[in-house]
Image (tube, helix red, strand yellow):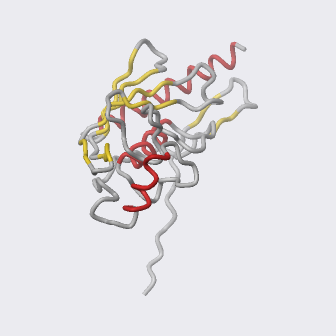
Amino acid sequence: MDDLRALRADRLNNEYNELMRLSDSGPVIKITPLGNPPFERYKVIFNIRTIISPAPDYRDQTVCTLTIPPNYPEIAPTITADDTPYPWHINWFKNGRWCFGTWTIEESLVNYLYRCAKTLQFDPGIANPNSVANGDAMPFWNANKDNKRIIPCDTQVLPTLDVPLLINVKEREAPKTITIKPQREKPKIKIK
């Protein structure tokens, strides 16, 4: 049990370092740890234009709380918007909690926040109409998903780090370690 706690603490410390690098990479996503290390809660400010009503009405900043559960990484963290009105998106619940879709223990928190930011931008490539958290937002989504003047509502480039989408978890070594290695992008092929 102590090995699992140590493994979790190491992962949380590594994740903290990567989250701080993301926060320092520019003004789009700002992250502040809450409490004491190893940090299990963060205040996340997304300086992203998002839709907050079907009018549509917009907001340029969404403040959220990222909460890491005691049984992380087996159980996914949660992201909840702090202020109303909440994002008017099919993948955000009416109570302000983000519906993250799928979670694997290998996903990094940086990638998790990146996916959340893409939903705040109303990026049609990440929206999941097959897993609707807010059914009231579905008619708006269907009516506007092909309207480039509305969706996506924010096209700024999100900050990226040289970190993997997934974390390699080595469980059979003594002591147990977590390694984070950058994934190499596949070469782009130009078709003439």
Q: Identify which residue is drawn at 44% across, 60% down.
A: 142
Q: Residue furthest right?
A: 172
Can you say whether 75 is above or below 130 in the image? Answer: above
- Residue 90: x %, y % from top left: 46, 48
Splitting the image into 4 quarters, where does residue 16 fall? top left
Q: Position of residue 130 (x, y in %)?
A: 58, 54
Residue at screen point 36% across, 25% down: 43
Residue shown at the point (53%, 30%) measured from the top left:
77
Looking at the rendered image, the quarter that the C terminus falls into is: bottom left
Along the line of sight, the residue nearer the viewer: 133 or 106: 133
> Which of the two residues, 175 or 117, is positioned nearer the viewer here?
117
How many labels, in total?
0
**Left or right for 83, reference 119:** left
Left or right placement of residue 68 versus residue 175 in this view = left
**146 or 44: nearer the eye?**
146
What residue is shown at x 62% (from left), y 18% (from top)? 6
Q: On screen, 166 above or below 34?
A: below
Tell me where residue 60 appears, x and y as whole percent. 23, 42
Expressed as whole percent of the image width and height from the top left, the position of residue 171 reads 72, 31
Quarter of the image where the N terminus is located: top right
Q: Is residue 128 left or right of residue 73?
A: left
Q: From the viewer's side, name the closer residue of 33 and 45.
A: 45
- In this view, the residue farthest toward the bottom is 192
> Would residue 86 be found to the left or right of residue 5 on screen?
left
Q: Quadrant of residue 61?
A: top left
